[in-house]
Image (cartoon, rainbow, N blue to C red):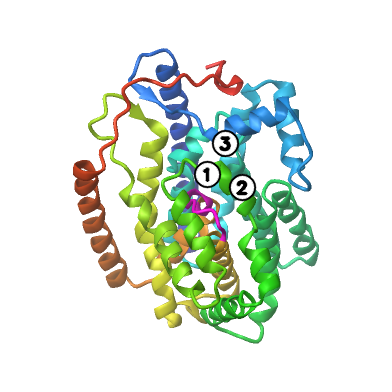
Amino acid sequence: MNGVEIQKIGVQREYKWYFIQLSAIIFTLMSVFFARHNLLPLTHYTIPDSGYYENWVFFPYEKGISTGFLYLNTFLYSIGVQSLVFYNSFLLLGSIYLCAIFEPFSPRAVTLARATIALNPYLLISIIGPTKEINLIFFSLAAFYLFLKDSYILKIASILPAVATMAIRPQFGYIILAAFACSLLLKFIKSPISICLLIIVAFLILNSIPVINSFVSNSGGEELEFFSTSIYYEIALILKAMQENPALQVLALMIKVVLVMFAPIARPNTIFSPFVPLLDWGYTFMGWFLFPLNLSFLLLFLKKKATQLPRLNQAGQLLLIYAFLGAFSVVISPIIQARYLFPYAPMIAACFALHTVKVRNRILIFSLALILLSFVLTAIFMPKYWMVPVEEGFVFVSWI
């Protein structure tokens, strides 16, 4: 009887998150409508990358395996730009369902993973147009959902969604396949944290070899010019040079960990601006939201027992390794972009549940104190004002 009751509670909680996700989508679409018709002082209600992907549809060119994303968007545009909302909404709702893979951590882990999807303003704003992040979240979760099944047929089938991510962002798919390969290591090394540390050491050694260093340093480096307006652009160039130096690469990685995982809580503050830039506030909110989750993830390297059997089974350990590989790939990339962590956020969030209640409370109190301090200091020393609303002239938003 208790088992039936528990199952019913789980189903109800799952339905609750579908409702939350749909409500968030409708609220976002209404906000964009009010912004476009000057009914609310909202601006920056689209994702710049969506404009780039739209332009790619109208002026197509080959981009290797990534051209698959062009084919997808071309198909959706041929149906009508409204189809983007339905397609992206379906993927988000599917991702809510697939978060069930975090049950090996705890029911709380499933809830946290779903929250990083349903409450992410960046994903909600990007739902209107072509977007990579929503696709990456759905296909990565689908890949692990299939891979963690007992059926060998489904394990083989998991390669399909992994390959699908390659057609969107190639390195993302490679990370999934690398995580699958790590499942073999878990048969010999029972500690996922030990495997992660071995990967770091192996990277530092290999990165000292000029040929490999050049490959890693320039992996994605050709896109740095597109981020020239970023406040981190000049810093990224310096850290790229440091990472190419075997003696300075450790320091460079430590600085980039801070910039990628924690610095977003100190973005320019627009609290006194007459216009509300939705995207800016979305980035800031996610910086606050992910700060304690990212911190708790790093602290797991000091709490190895929390990640070992029987506290965490092999399925959970594999997901932890994937979260590490994803975060590490973002850190070593020449491009300093915290939003590149968003597709890995469900995995990182699930790991928060591995800590004891006492540790979790301390992380939350410490994080809240820093966030409040950051908010006050940025309001005083880093104010930013939006005086004129920006006309979002993209086709994908024209119908709203």
Discs 3/2, front: 2
* Above or below, 363 relative to 115: below
Nearer to me, 392 or 242: 242
Q: Amino acid at mark 3?
A: Asp
- How many angstroms separate mark 3 from mark 1 (CA)? 11 Å
Left or right, 376 with reference to 312: left
* Above or below, 123 relative to 193: above
* Above or below, 263 relative to 281: below
Residue bearing the label numbered 3 = 49
Q: Is residue 399 visible?
A: yes
- How many angstroms separate mark 3 from mark 2 (CA)? 13 Å
Task: Kindly identify the residue that appears in the image at 46 percent across and 43 percent down.
Answer: 118
Q: Which residues are magenta?
A: 333-341
Label placed on residue 354:
none
Task: Kindly identify the residue that appears in the image at 48 percent across and 32 percent down.
Answer: 25
Left or right, 65 with reference to 393: right
Residue at disc 3, secondary structure: helix
Residue bearing the label numbered 1 = 227
Asked whether disc 2 touches disc 1, contact meaning CB atoms under 8 Å apart, the reply is: yes
Left or right, 313 with reference to 369: right
Q: Is residue 9 visible?
A: no
Task: Kindly identify the residue that appears in the image at 24 percent across and 51 percent down.
Answer: 374
Q: Amino acid at mark 2?
A: Glu
* Above or below, 51 relative to 382: above
Comes first in the chain, label 3 or label 2: 3
Nearer to me, 149 or 270: 270
Residue bearing the label numbered 2 = 223
Residue 153, image x, y percentages = 81, 62
Residue 141, image x, y percentages = 61, 54
Comes first in the chain, label 3 or label 1: 3
Nearer to me, 248 or 3: 248
Q: Number of callouts in the render?
A: 3
